[in-house]
Amino acid sequence: MPDRPTPALDRLVATDPATFTEQHWGRQALLSRAADLPQPFTDLLDEPAVDELVSERGLRTPFLRVAKSGQTLGDRAFTAPGGVGAGIADQLSDSKLVALFGDGATIVLQALHRVWPPIIDFVGALADELGHPVQANAYVTPPQNQGFDDHYDVHDVFVLQVAGTKRWRIHAPVWESPLRDQPWTDRRAAVQRAAAEPPLIEAVLEPGDCLYLPRGFLHAATALGGVSTHLTLGVHTWTRYTLAEQLTAQALRSLVGDADLRGSLALGLDPTRPETLGPDVERVRTALLDAVRTADADTLVAALRRADRDSRRPAPVGPLHQLGTASTLEPTTVLRLREHLAATLDHADGRSVLRSRAGELVLDEADVAPVKALLDDGQAAVTDLGDALARRLVLGAVVVA
């Protein structure tokens, strides 16, 4: 049997999952050295891959940014039309990038979890393990250059040093656990003051090292003696504030049916005298608190499930391959669920619906039992599903051969 792949998180942290969860997740930075990790990261990305991505893949903005002296350059500085048959004006220009990189600019490849197969697979596995959405960017910096000034991110990050070396300076947060609409630029002065203090961590990352930073931790990096490439995995964590948003939204939806709350405020209201609103505010407060207290947990979970599905994509499938599979199904053909699908069998309004990141399939009553078995086992033979259902699942991009 082939070796089982190393769990994604085990490749990133030199500690056991329980210790990472209790001591570091969302709390403290963690530097893991290459010698304490299973393998380097060149299987995910290397310098030839960077050259291929910017010169041969026809990428467009926003799949690339370029920064110099802490500032992001305008798109026109590194894009150009693609020529006959591909005249779109915002394609990456390798010619411009050569000049900019030679002049000290940092290349930032964005959303690699959408365009580079090894990272697509790894990010999908990591997101499943963490239970939170993950994105991937790569930062390629010329020698002795700093890509961005000290700042914090509104998501957790794993920094994977791929090639070269970078000196990192880490400072404690000036705003703990920032939300996605609380960027560092809102606290620029506080960040600058904190960055002038002695760092919490100052270390040189070598190839194969990995640094975990919870959201809010200040950081800046400078390439040292050669070209430095690191991969940043951004973890967009679900938070208790997310639960608060969903509970509040559910409560407000329930209050739509309250005729008293839908009633108009008093005629001749003077909004400059808040005391006149006192009785109305109290009535609304009481109704809202009651609605939050009685919010249905199943409805909340369903809303979070929808948000989670929208935040990620399932494993890639090829339309031609799927059509070929559907055309050559045999009774013994084994079909397995597409990875990272987040599929559920739901019953509502007298219908049974298979919902997933691939979309929705309305099922006949006879299809419910075999689909439930498929979800439980992760795979099924065509003979167990039936020819018609198997074909629907293949062309619905739910299963692969």
Image (cartoon, helix red, strand yellow):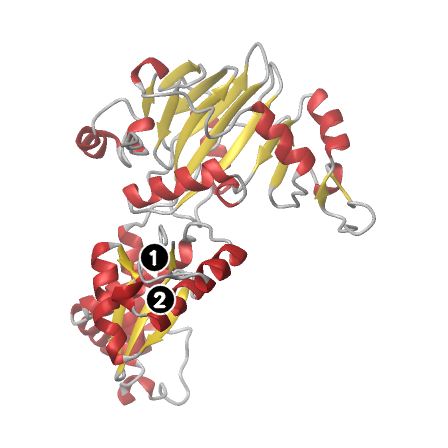
State the residue at coordinates (71%, 30%): 97
**Measured from the top left, where is residue 48 in percent x and y?**
60, 25
Q: Position of residue 249 (x, y in %)?
A: 32, 68
Q: Which residue is mark 2?
A: 390
351 left or right of 90?
left
Q: In the picture shown, does residue 227 fall above or below 17? A: above
Indicate the amino acid at tag 2.
Ala
Q: Are marks 1 and 2 in contact (CB under 8 Å)?
A: yes
- Name, please, the residue furthest toward the top: 225
How far across and down, in percent of the image, does residue 332 sit? 31, 58
Residue 199 sits in quarter? top left
Which residue is denoted by mark 1 in the rendering?
A: 333
Name the residue at 54% across, 43% down.
115
Check disc 1: other Cα within 10 Å, few if <14, some if 14-19, many if 20+.
Answer: some
301 or 347: which is nearer to us? 347
Within 10 Å of disc 2 (Cα), the crowding (few <14, some 14-19, many 20+) is many
Secondary structure at numbered mark 1: loop
User: 133 and 171: which one is in front?
Assistant: 133
Between residue 277 and residue 314, name the one nearer to us.
Answer: 314
- Is 263 above or below relative to 304? below
The mark lying in front, picked from 1 and 2, is 1
Of residue 157 and residue 362, the one placed in the foreground of this image is 362
Q: Quadrant of the N terminus?
A: top left
Give x and y (percent) for residue 172: 35, 27
Residue 217 falls left or right of residue 100: left
Residue type, label 1: Thr
Q: Find the distance from the CA under tag 1 to the CA under tag 2.
A: 10 Å
Badge 2 element:
helix
User: Is any atom of residue 316 visible in this view?
Assistant: yes
